[in-house]
Image (cartoon, coloured by chain):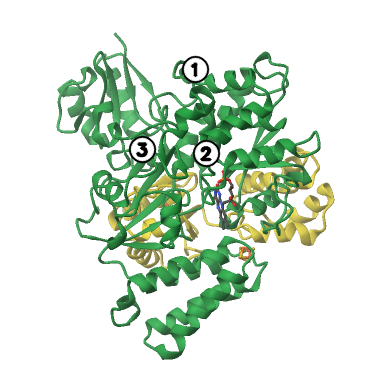
Chain colours: A green, B yellow
């Protein structure tokens, strides 16, 4: 009997040896005469256990990890192909608490299926949303997205349905759907995990968006730092075309939709939606002034839906299960789930898809298990390099857009970077300014020049020079950047800086407040 | 095929529109490892752009190299999540081992060192990238082993 063995081909798994482990399992199983079928799945998102190898047994999939090449002979000796016990055995995958406690809606298939198998995709609920959408009018599709409460997952949390309605109502028969897969924030990897683990889900979401707003063409803008995702994405688009999902006659519906993938150039600012559009058009990634909104005058001057990858990939389940099903998850105005990403100095790093509303403490400690170093958590940066540093006394915060905003922080794309008590927050504040100086698109002075001045002022403060002059100077500079920048790059870089200063004054050579 | 023929073939493989610029530049860098200065003029002509526009795009995107790199390009992640896992110490080790800083190439021409801001491997850092491979949980000894492998790989 052929046993199915799963070894992820996800970047993070490959980065810690999954490729070599897959080769070793295949070769050694063959040498022992054991018939196996090796499936290269996506990652389950239990990153600290990667490479996580699974074996299909009559009782369900059994997990082992983290597996190294050196472990493979012992695993085979122990009978892991039958799901036998072993020091690396983790039991049934679905029963691992980290996974079991999650609410996987958008990530339901990631790690479960073969990412490039359309048969697998369909067998696990794929295209159910598209089929519903094909039976609805554009207005009805938009209404479902609006009623679901889905808000943009790229950072600004703007209601997706309202954006789609604007594009639907805009005049013109040429419109575009653009997927923002630039995922530049440190500490975030959910876009990548979904793209490498379930690319057809994004394609389905974009198809639905196309039907909703009347677009026949979609673009996916992927960052160049994701070479594996780039390969998976292009392979998935080819297969979708061959299967008639993309092209002139989507699933025989008479509707046309095709997708082109574009690769970025390593510029953080190209995640900002108008800079991204400039980049697709073949120019430097410089931010455009708004209005006009991209929904009215976007790609090539046409009405354009531009959404984050996770926003789009959350649409199929909303259509398949209904707006109310999705809206029933969450709290307040934050509806549905967010795939949180636990990163940095955390014991159990990975992807946690949960309904909004659990607390930071639950996420960091119940899921994350505290720091990897075993030392106390001192600060967490939430929402990427433009997000505030949150100190331990604020870990009671519920993960909700409004609750975070009320304390001067933001959820953003859901990434959490954990730091232990050895972190020097003065250096992190300096880094925030340094990053802004490196990545500024250069269009406005407060961002371009202000960030360089910011590095210099922080250096003087850290060197203990004239705090009476330099501290007010830093605060003035931050106010200028917040008030005078065209986009959030310059406008929000002050948040990590000021939060570090406020909560960790000792790291700047100041007495605790 | 001469380099000039190669450039023309790569340019001709895309529609002659401005939005082909970045895809063509990627294809050139994929073939050659960098974008040589003689690419500017035929690109500008084919896409009906000024040479300044083409140059402006090449210089804007950090991924695009206008200087020929060493045999392997090694990108070290400098972003926050990797810092939380000790990437600053790793960076110091790498600089010392290679005897170079960012945007420099080792004397033997084997390694060019570049900074990168996040490789999406933030739960398994510190991270680096060599060519199209990502390497995670990198510490000094894992780096040293990788370096030996790269130095021995004469492909
Ligand atoms: C500096 C900057 C960087 C950004 N980077 C990203 C990014 O990498 N991915 C993303 O989806 N949105 C990013 N955004 C937000 C986008 O501008 C935009 O809000 C988003 O693509 C809209 O999609 P959504 O409504 O689905 O979130 C960034 C914004 C700024 C100001
Ligand atoms: S704030 Fe900075 S990145 Fe944004 S438009 Fe101005 S210069 Fe460009
Ligand atoms: S911060 Fe280094 S991989 Fe994301």
Q: Which mark is drawn over residue A147?
A: none
Q: CA distance from mark 3 to mark 2?
A: 23 Å
Ligand 1 is within 8 Å of the C-beta of the residue at disc 1: no
Residue at 29 percent of width and 43 percent of height: A48
Q: Quadrant of residue A221?
A: top right
A99 or A262, which is in the foreground? A99
Q: CA distance from mark 3 to mark 1?
A: 22 Å
Could you tell which of marks 3 and 2 lies nearer the N-terminus? Answer: 3
Q: Quadrant of the C terminus of chain A?
A: bottom left
Q: Which mark is drawn over residue A122?
A: 1
Q: Which mark is drawn over residue A150?
A: 2
Give the residue at the far top of this rendering: A1
Could you tell which of marks 1 and 2 lies nearer the N-terminus? Answer: 1
Q: Is residue A113 above or below residue B66?
A: above
Q: Position of residue B144 (x, y in %)?
A: 32, 55
Residue at 44 percent of width and 66 percent of height: A496
Q: In the shown orientation, is residue A69 left or right of residue B4?
A: left
Q: Which residue is mark 3?
A: A45
Q: Is residue A18 above or below residue A274?
A: above
Q: CA distance from mark 1 to mark 2?
A: 24 Å
Q: Is residue A478 above or below residue A37?
A: below
A481 or A459, which is in the foreground? A481
């Amino acid at each position: 009997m052929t046993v199915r063995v799963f070894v992820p081909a996800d970047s993070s798994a490959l980065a810690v040896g999954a490729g070599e482990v897959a080769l070793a399992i295949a070769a050694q199983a063959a040498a022992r005469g054991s018939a196996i079928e090796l499936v290269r799945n996506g990652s389950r998102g239990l990153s600290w256990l990667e490479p996580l190898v699974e074996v299909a047994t009559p009782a369900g999939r059994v997990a082992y990890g983290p597996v190294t090449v050196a472990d493979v002979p012992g695993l085979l000796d122990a009978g892991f192909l039958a799901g036998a016990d072993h020091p690396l055995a983790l039991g049934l995958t679905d029963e691992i608490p980290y996974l079991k406690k999650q609410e996987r809606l958008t990530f339901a298939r990631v790690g479960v299926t073969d990412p490039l198998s359309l048969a697998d995709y369909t067998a696990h609920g794929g295209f159910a949303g598209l089929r519903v959408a094909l039976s609805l009018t554009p207005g009805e599709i938009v209404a479902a997205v609006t009623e679901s409460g889905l808000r943009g997952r790229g950072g600004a949390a703007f209601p997706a349905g309202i954006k789609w309605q604007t594009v639907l109502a805009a005049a013109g028969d040429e419109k575009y759907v653009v997927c923002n897969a630039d995922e530049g924030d440190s500490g975030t990897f959910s876009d990548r995990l979904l793209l490498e683990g379930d690319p057809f889900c994004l394609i389905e979401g974009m198809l639905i968006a196309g039907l909703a707003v009347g677009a026949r063409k979609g673009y996916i803008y992927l960052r160049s730092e994701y070479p594996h995702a780039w390969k998976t994405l292009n392979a998935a688009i080819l297969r979708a075309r061959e299967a008639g999902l993309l092209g002139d006659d989507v699933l025989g519906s008479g509707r046309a939709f095709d997708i082109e993938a574009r690769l970025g150039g390593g510029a953080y600012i190209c995640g900002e939606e108008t800079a991204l559009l400039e980049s697709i058009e073949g120019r430097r990634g410089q931010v455009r002034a708004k209005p006009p909104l991209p929904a009215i005058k976007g790609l090539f001057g046409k009405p354009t839906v531009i959404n984050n990858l996770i926003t789009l990939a959350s649409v199929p389940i909303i259509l398949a299960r209904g707006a109310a099903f999705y809206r029933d998850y969450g709290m307040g105005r934050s509806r549905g789930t967010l795939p949180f990403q636990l990163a940095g100095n955390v014991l159990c790093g990975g992807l946690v898809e949960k309904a909004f509303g659990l607390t930071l403490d639950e996420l960091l400690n119940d899921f994350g298990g505290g720091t990897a170093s075993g030392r106390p958590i001192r600060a967490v940066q939430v929402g990427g390099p433009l997000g505030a540093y949150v100190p331990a006394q604020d870990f009671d915060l519920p993960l909700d857009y409004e609750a975070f905003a009320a304390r001067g922080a933001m959820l953003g794309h859901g990434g959490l970077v954990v730091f232990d008590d050895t972190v020097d927050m003065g250096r992190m504040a300096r880094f925030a300014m340094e990053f802004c100086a490196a990545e500024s698109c250069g269009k406005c002075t407060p961002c371009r020049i202000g960030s360089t001045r910011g590095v210099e002022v922080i250096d003087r403060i850290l060197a203990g020079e004239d705090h009476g002059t330099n501290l007010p100077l830093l605060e003035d500079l931050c106010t200028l950047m917040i008030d005078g920048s065209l986009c959030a790059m310059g406008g929000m870089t002050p948040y990590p800086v000021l939060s570090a200063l406020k909560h960790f004054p000792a790291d700047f050579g100041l007495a605790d407040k | 095929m001469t380099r000039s023929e190669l450039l023309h073939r790569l340019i001709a493989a895309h529609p002659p529109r401005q939005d082909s610029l970045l895809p063509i530049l990627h294809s050139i860098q994929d073939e050659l490892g960098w974008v040589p200065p003689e690419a500017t003029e035929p690109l500008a002509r084919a896409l009906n752009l000024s040479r300044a526009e083409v140059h402006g795009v090449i210089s804007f995107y950090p991924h695009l190299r206008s200087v020929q790199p060493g045999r392997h390009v090694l990108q070290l992640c400098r972003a926050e999540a990797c810092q939380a896992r000790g990437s600053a110490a790793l960076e110091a080790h790498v600089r010392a081992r290679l005897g170079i800083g960012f945007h420099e190439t080792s004397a033997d021409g084997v390694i060019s060192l570049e900074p990168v801001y996040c490789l999406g491997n933030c739960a398994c850092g510190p991270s680096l990238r060599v060519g199209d491979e990502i390497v995670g949980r990198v510490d000094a000894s894992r780096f040293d082993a990788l370096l030996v492998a790269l130095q021995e790989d004469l492909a």
